[in-house]
Amino acid sequence: MSEKTVDKKSRFTSWIVIFSLIYIIFLEIVVKPKIMAVGGKFVTPVETTYYDGIETEFVLLKDETPFNAASVNEPMHYDEGTRLGFGEIKAGKTTSNEYALLSKRLQDINDRISIYKNQINDIDKELRRSIINGNYSLAVDLVGSFSYQNNESVGQINVEDLEKEKANITNQINHMAGEIIWNPPGIISYTLDGFEDLKNESLYLTSRDEFKSILNRPVVKSYSRDFKIIDNFKATAMFYAPNNGRLKELDGKYVTYSIDNFNTFGKGIALVPADYDKEGVAGIFINSHIEDIYQMRKGKINVIFDSVKALIIPTGSLIKKDGVVGVLARDVNGIIQFRPVKLLKREAEKSYVSQGNEKGMINVNGEDVLTLQYYEDVVLRPDPDMIGQIFIRNEFK
């Protein structure tokens, strides 16, 4: 081989080395600092299902027949939640509004007497302690407090009067079961909560203000041997959701709902009363799986109109380019791309975006374009200057 040939090869190799060094320096000086600036600043979207609909609070209406245990003519051997056929219990019927009101008043009296007695006992203990310790000024104050409690703590009503009223109400309740009847079919429950006066039909009689009052009414559960039979073929989730045209369109049709934050789902019939436009009160008629929800009275409900395959991304990753909302995403080749997104819901920390059609496309200004894919990484702190740059996927994620 001639010296000239060797010299050419040597120069060619030198140029390769020089260009390689220049490229490495370029990576170190220009590219890598930018990579390092966002190193660890990528996040992979989370696949989920986004449910479009109504989220609100509800009250569960049920047809419930309360009974007085004292009127039952035979021993009770039924566990909570047992489904009974017609005529398995011979009992006196106490299923009137009067019974519900009397029961509520009786519970109120018992609570007031209990509070009063506890307060008096506390004062009595302090009074004895102050006398023993020779603190007579405190004793005088406590006596005054006793007098105040005796008159004020029960609303200017004498405790003896409360006891008399309690005895009278108890007697009325015990004698309301004059007619002996057989129980209706349904689920037996020993938990009375003071809402037994509400029926499925109450949906059509409830105004907006009345619904809010019912929603704010405390659930006071009574675990006595009194019991009720709950119709296990129908219940109504009553809720307030004003000015919803989609809900009105679904009146009388089956809709999907969830009352446990999308863990389970049920089907029911949308009910939109005639005065919905004025009052905003609607409901879902439920006629299956009542045994799973019969103990519920209030809660949150999601009425679902549509479900969409979606991705959860950080809200801070959203950016606008040419008036289009999107994100900067690192594709499979490590190249930063702008991906337009269809925003389904925006929250403070996270947002929901559509996964698009079966090809991963969404419509932007009349044109189908590729949107964010589940396998692409999202830039947490987007900078438009990053578009087109290459970011090593594994090293800097």
Image (cartoon, helix red, strand yellow):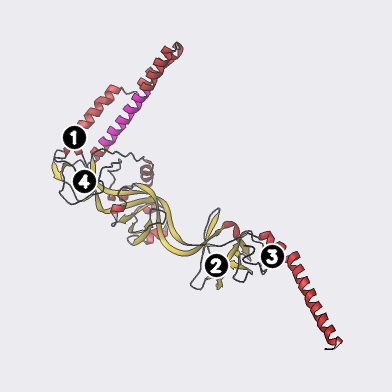
State which mark lies toward you, 2 or 1.
Answer: 2
Q: Earlier in the sequence, mark 1 or mark 3?
A: 1
Q: Magenta residues: mostly which secondary structure?
A: helix
Q: Amino acid at mark 2?
A: Tyr
Going from N to C along the chain, the mark reached first, 3 or 4, is: 4
| Rendered image: mark on residue 385 | 3
The N terminus lies in quadrant: bottom right
Q: Quadrant of residue 73?
A: top left
Q: Which residue is mark 1?
A: 174
SS assignment at label 4:
loop
Cα distance between the residues tagged 3 and 4: 72 Å
Q: Which residue is mark 2?
A: 375
The number of callouts visible is 4
CA–CA distance between discs 1 and 4? 22 Å
* Residue 277 coordinates in the image, percent (x, y): 39, 53
Foreground disc of the pair 3, 2:
2
Q: Residue at x 78, y 71 (%)?
A: 21
Mark 4 — residue?
78
Is the C-beta separation of discs 2 and 1 under 8 Å?
no
Residue at disc 2, secondary structure: loop
Q: Is residue 205 left or right of residue 34?
A: left
Labels 2 and 1: the sequence-earlier one: 1
Depth check, front residue: 211 or 49: 49
Residue 84 shows up from this direction: yes
Specify few, some or many for label 2: CA neighbours under 10 Å numbering under 14, 14-19, or 20 or more.
some
Please tell me in which quadrant of the rendered image residue 14 appears.
Answer: bottom right
The type of residue carrying mark 1 is Asn
**x, y percent for residue 371:** 55, 69
